Image (spheres, rainbow, N blue to C red):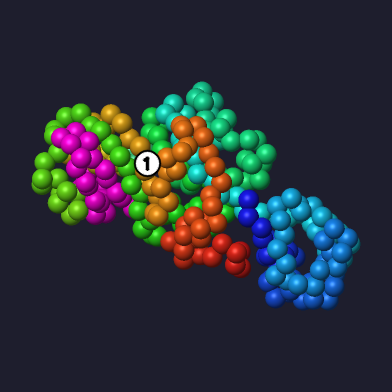
Amino acid sequence: MESMRLDRCLANAGLGSRSEVRDLVKKGQVTISGQIVRDPGYRIQPEQTDVVCVKGQSILVRHQIHLMLHKPAGLVTALDDKHLPTIASLVPEQLWQRGLFPVGRLDRDTTGLLILTTDGTLGHRLASPHWEVWKKYELTVEGAAFTAVDPELFAHGLILPDGLHCQPAKLEIHTSHAASLTIHEGKFHQVKRMMLATGRTVTRLHRHSVGSLALDPGLAPGQWRELAPDEIQSLYQLVDLEPDKDR
Ligand code: URA
């Protein structure tokens, strides 16, 4: 988990704007482990949780958490489901309690990269078609073999039988029945519907990457790890945010 600037931590805790909380710090009204800290840029380490006091009152330090999970098949992308097992069992309960949530959804039978974050703005932007974050899937199909005209068809933007106009997508053919497809939308069953519209049934679907972030090949299905600082930085950059600023 990353360290966080003191002024951001105070603003996150609802103690005022960045400039207001900076004043509090400079006036000597903030202590960490009982010591007055006058530097708003002081970095709070994750283990320092609950030792920050403002005017003698301890405050809750909320560090953002960002993970990548290798979603296995068989689990639904939800924290709770009446009938089916969910991804909730894969990550410790105390992390969910911190407000962690999955960015977008993968179908129950889809495997691969799922980003989990506590930052609502980041999660929303990464999933929203407005921000055009590319998601790359590896897939195998049954039915019509891929041919040289398919990449062009997908690049023009398919129109599905139900009238959905898909944004241009990038199809790279690996074999007659295997390809990768890169899209920047995430409508319900989108990849499967695009394949169905071109005479194919998806038999395996695996998300390889989201933007610049690829699934770590060292993670077995069901395993997760925290994102590294450079990975976090590049995700925020993709959607015009800064990890350590103003939110
Ligand atoms: N498209 C699908 O059809 N399913 C997924 O899980 C992800 C994208």
Residue type indicated by callout 1: Arg
Name the residue at 80% across, 73% down: 38
Name the residue at 40% across, 34% down: 111
Out of 74 and 41, give the one closest to the viewer: 41
The picture places residue 209, in percent across and down from the top left corner, at 38, 47
The picture places residue 9, in percent across and down from the top left corner, at 70, 61
Residue 171 falls within the magenta-colored stretch: yes
Q: Quadrant of the C terminus?
A: bottom right
Name the residue at 65% across, 35% down: 93
Out of 237 and 103, give the one closest to the viewer: 237
What span is colored magenta in the figure?
157-185
Out of 176 and 203, give the one closest to the viewer: 176
The residue to which callout 1 is attached is: 207
Visible residue check, residue 234: yes
Q: Which of the 4 quarters of the picture holds residue 192? A: top left
Label 1, secondary structure: give it: strand
Q: Quadrant of ligand 1?
A: top left
Under 8 Å from ligand 1: the CB of mark 1? Answer: yes
Packing grade of label 1 (10 A; few <14, some 14-19, many >=20) is many
Q: How many marks?
A: 1
